[in-house]
Image: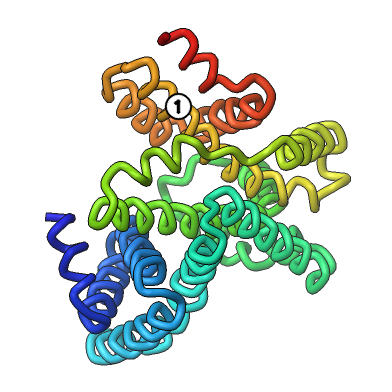
Amino acid sequence: MLRGLVVFTMQGRWQSAIVIAVMSLMALMLPPVSYLASGIVALCTLRAGPKEGITVLFIATAVFASVAMLLMAQPLLAGIFLISNWLPVYGISSILGYTRSLSMSLLVTTGIGVLLVVGAYIVLPSPAEWWLQMMEPMVKMLEAQPGWKLGQAETQLFVTTLSSVMTGLLVAGLFANIVLGLLLGRAWQAMLYSPMSFAEEFQQLRLGKMPAIVMMVTTATALLAGSSVPLLQDCLPILIVLFVVQGLAVTHAIVRLQQRHKAWLIVMYVLLLIMTSQMAVLLALIGVLEQWFNFRQGSLEQDE
């Protein structure tokens, strides 16, 4: 069914735009569907080029705004999706199209994410305080709920902790959406026009030692300095997402090289869903260490 939908989107710009708009509308009720819409954006851009990709986005925005106006009287939702989802995925897809390098595309997007965090600290005197003020109405609403079990002091501690990392988590979430959209789009492109090429490309992903060193220094400084260096604390989630992708690439490669059953990958993704933070740290660690220990090469030698 999904293959049929992807084939349909490649039949013309209107088909692509309609699928992107409809999936994004569905994402208002089922958020994960937005990843599929981002994948279609990436697929169109990678296959037809940046010029056609931006044309599809403009049509999708018009379609989304029209339907949102009729159903919810909220046409501005189209602009929110365009800025927060579609344009970033379009940008990273264009970079991949020009550079033909998945690692370069990911690193450039990571740099942009870090710049967004730095920009927040330039615009706002204290992003944590700003988030604390923004969440205050929500906190009062939660405390008023009969089933809310935390006391006032515990609630305040929780909200204060959350606000201190909210900027980084928000940008990391946006980054994850962009990366997943890119990977889906590239996988679909390979599925339609060059089977197995994406699997090889993804499993050979190598981010390099310098980004790994930046990751280690940022992690060590953030852990040792704590809240005294909030900027690094907010940059850390973005770097973790980046090296989670590297860790996934390494795991996929090892499973293939050692001819393990695909159930290993299924278990890994299930654990990533139910133990997100622990698995993210583990995969990021694998991704960092890979730059020196080359687990994939070791697995190949062991298999031989």
Frontmost residue, 127 versus 98: 98
Q: Amino acid at mark 1?
A: Thr
Is residue 205 shown above or below 7? Answer: above
Frontmost residue, 152 versus 247: 247
On the rendered image, what quadrant is the N terminus found in?
A: bottom left
The residue sitting at 71% across, 58% down in the picture is 114
Residue 178 in percent (x, y) is at 49, 59
Frontmost residue, 13 versus 133: 13
Residue 272 in percent (x, y) is at 42, 33
The residue sitting at 51% across, 22% down in the picture is 296
Q: How many circles with numbers are drawn on the protein?
A: 1
Is residue 281 shown above or below 227? Answer: above
**In the drawing, does residue 140 fall left or right of residue 186?**
right
For label 1, the SS is: helix
**In the drawing, does residue 51 fall left or right of residue 173?**
left
Q: Which residue is mark 1?
A: 251
Is residue 152 shown above or below 185? Answer: above
Q: In the rendered image, is residue 166 in sight?
A: no
Q: In the rendered image, is residue 76 in sight?
A: yes
On the rendered image, what quadrant is the C terminus found in?
A: top left
